[in-house]
Image (cartoon, rainbow, N blue to C red):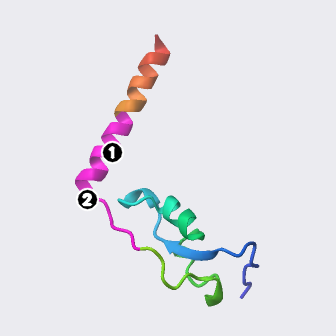
Amino acid sequence: MNTPKRADSRKIWYVDFPTSQYKENAKDLAKARGLRIIDSRFKGAYPNDMIEMSPPSLSSKSKGQVKKEAEAAKEQIVSSVAVAAQ
């Protein structure tokens, strides 16, 4: 197996993508703890000495919250397009 080389000294934190599905800001947590986020679909691609064994915990947003955020984003895009069309 071709093991990735250590590009930096940060430990790897495997996270299920997309990170927007979590209540917490995964990128901010990683930065604060000096971790590098890697999509969990790549588990096993890095040696254990590169993996953070006690990563921060994340909690999923409720489906209602995700839907509400998606609708707000859609509304923002629609209003931006309407302003640009004027």
In depth, the one of 81 and 26 nearer the eye is 26
Highlighted magenta segment, given as a residue range: 57-74
What mark, if any, has residue 62 been given in the picture? 2
Mark 1 residue crowding within 10 angstroms, few (<14) / some (14–19) / many (20+): few
Q: Which residue is mark 1?
A: 69
Residue type pointed to by label 2: Ser
Name the quadrant of the N terminus: bottom right
- x 33%, y 45%: residue: 69
What mark, if any, has residue 26 been given in the picture? none
- Would you place residue 39 above or below residue 3 in this image? above
Q: CA distance from mark 2 to mark 1?
A: 11 Å
Spot occupied by residue 54 in the image (x, y as percentages of width and height):
48, 83
Disc 1 is placed on an element classified as helix
Judged left or right of residue 47, residue 15 is: left
Quadrant of the rendered structure where residue 44 is?
A: bottom right
Spot occupied by residue 79 in the image (x, y as percentages of width and height):
39, 24
- Would you place residue 43 above or below residue 75 in this image? below
Q: Is residue 63 magenta?
A: yes
Most extreme residue toward the left, as rendered? 64
Sequence order check: which comes first, mark 2 or mark 1?
2
Most extreme residue toward the front, as rendered? 32
Spot occupied by residue 35 in the image (x, y as percentages of width and height):
58, 71
Disc 2 is placed on an element classified as loop
Judged left or right of residue 2, residue 15 is: left
Residue type pointed to by label 1: Glu
Q: Is residue 26 magenta?
A: no
- x 57%, y 63%: residue: 31
- Would you place residue 68 above or below residue 77 in this image? below
